[in-house]
Image (tube, rainbow, N blue to C red):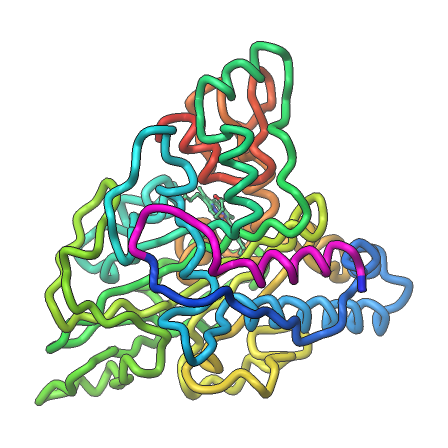
């Protein structure tokens, strides 16, 4: 087994042990057993970018996908003695990036509006009256990543400024085994329904790897998620039980926070998980994986390199309702005529940045200092006078005071 894989295993195993502050669900340290043997990700990236044959490339993508599914299984693992999966027992963004003496408010879950939504060029359209209900995000750092930020004081803008002044262009790199998970949530009331778009390729009518943003309200199919079935269901919006999602039942709304935003919750509401990003420091450029709720009747996503492919049979219950894509590079997989960069979560980047977008091509612009530019208009990016934050946008935007 590779040293990085061993490290990752140890870190995830230590996951539940750590940390301060917020009321995180209690649990003994989480066990983590990767479902697949360790893989040489650098060699895989090479085989995907510069394949020796189409079959070799296909095999490499399948191996990478199996690995990404095993990471998903590792972060969602929940021993029967635990009240929450592994990742929810890790410190969140507010805790990780808090100034020395500032303690974030106590909470079961601290949410925010995803900056990708508010900073997107089509942000106004996403907010209009016909838009879908709000999506909330949470970001959690595993203990290795958390300790790196705290010990190096990377949360402190003064430290960043000193590095920039000294001509340093990169923060100290996150150690191997760091993991950051970003989750996306929607609220389903105790009574009533919450619409949710169902992603499939018929939502875009262009080269599927280079389409403009496809806001969810314009997708061809939607479902209506409920907890208590409405008396008159809308035939255009098939009902789906909230139990088909990973979800959190809100007992006491005062235990939930929205950081810089408004969240109206009532007892009995449920937060449903509609998407998840996972970034693991298994290569210097991280591994990027994304997961989204796929619907219950999608059978067309089983191409060898697509949504449902390689999903482990051991994923059961609502967890098998999620699809996945993953990449190690901005050259996600090549196709005839050049690199194919597409790699996105339909609910987030698909809706805001277009389906030609790629995790790495945006995250490698994550910098603090210099101009006030943040993120989404990557054409304006320049490293001049800035500090790269090792691909992490939450750190970059925190240091910029955004
Ligand atoms: C167009 C830009 C853009 C693209 C494309 C993008 N992201 Fe992000 N991402 C962001 C921003 C901005 C944040 C900061 C969110 C915050 O502060 O919470 C972020 C946050 C994250 C985080 C939390 C760690 C961090 O960087 O702060 C992860 C993990 C992540 N994204 C993974 C992904 C994955 C996986 C993909 C591809 C499927 C992706 N991102 C595509 C802009 C982007």
Residue 72 locus on image (x, y percent):
55, 68
**For this view, does 1 lie left or right of residue 286?**
right
Q: Check the image and name the residue furthest to the left.
A: 231
Q: Quadrant of the N terminus?
A: bottom right
Vertical placement of residue 21 versus 97, above or below: below
For the point 73% across and 54% down, which residue is it? 4
Vertical placement of residue 61 versus 280, above or below: below
Q: Check the image and name the residue furthest to the right.
A: 52
Choose between 6 and 327: the one closer to the eye. 6
Vertical placement of residue 323 versus 235, above or below: above
Q: Check the image and name the residue furthest to the top.
A: 165
For the point 60% across and 36% down, which residue is it? 390
Choose between 99 and 218: the one closer to the eye. 99
Read off the magenta span.
Answer: 2-23
Vertical placement of residue 172 versus 218, above or below: above
Residue 237 locus on image (x, y percent):
24, 81
Residue 195 locus on image (x, y percent):
24, 72
Which image quarter: residue 135?
A: bottom left
């Amino acid at each position: 087994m590779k040293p990085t894989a061993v490290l990752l295993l140890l870190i995830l195993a230590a996951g539940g042990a750590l940390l301060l502050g917020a009321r995180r669900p209690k649990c003994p340290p989480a066990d983590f057993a990767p479902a697949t043997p360790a893989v040489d990700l650098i060699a895989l990236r090479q085989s995907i970018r510069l394949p020796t044959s189409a079959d070799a490339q296909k095999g490499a993508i399948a191996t990478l996908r199996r690995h990404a599914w095993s990471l998903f299984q590792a972060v969602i693992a929940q021993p029967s003695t635990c009240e929450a999966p592994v990742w929810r027992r890790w410190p969140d963004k507010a805790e990780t990036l808090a100034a020395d003496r500032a303690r974030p408010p106590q909470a079961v879950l601290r949410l925010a509006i995803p900056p990708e939504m508010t900073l997107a060029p089509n942000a106004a359209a996403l907010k209009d009256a016909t838009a879908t209900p709000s999506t909330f995000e949470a970001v959690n750092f595993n203990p290795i990543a958390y300790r790196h930020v705290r010990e190096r004081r990377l949360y402190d803008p003064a430290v960043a400024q000193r590095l920039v002044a000294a001509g340093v262009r990169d923060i100290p790199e996150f150690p191997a085994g760091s993991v950051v998970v970003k989750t996306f949530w929607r609220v389903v009331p105790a009574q009533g329904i919450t619409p949710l778009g169902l992603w499939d390729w018929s939502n875009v009518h262009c080269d599927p790897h280079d389409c403009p943003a496809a806001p969810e309200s314009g997708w061809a199919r939607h479902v209506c998620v409920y907890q208590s079935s409405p008396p008159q269901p809308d035939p255009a919006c098939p009902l789906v039980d909230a139990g088909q999602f990973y979800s959190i039942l809100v007992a006491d709304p005062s235990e939930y926070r929205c950081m810089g935003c408004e969240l109206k919750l009532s007892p009995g509401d449920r937060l449903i998980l509609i998407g998840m990003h996972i970034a693991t420091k298994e290569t210097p450029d991280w591994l990027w994986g994304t997961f989204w709720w796929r619907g219950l009747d999608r059978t067309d996503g089983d191409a060898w390199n697509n949504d449902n492919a390689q999903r482990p049979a051991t994923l059961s219950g609502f967890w098998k309702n999620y699809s996945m894509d993953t990449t190690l590079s901005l050259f996600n997989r090549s196709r005839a005529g050049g690199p194919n960069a597409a790699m996105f979560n339909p609910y987030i980047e698909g809706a805001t940045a277009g389906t030609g977008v790629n995790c790495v091509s945006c995250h490698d612009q994550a910098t603090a200092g210099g101009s006030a530019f943040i993120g989404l208009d990557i054409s304006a990016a320049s490293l001049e006078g800035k500090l790269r934050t090792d691909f992490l946008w939450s750190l970059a935007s925190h240091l910029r005071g955004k």
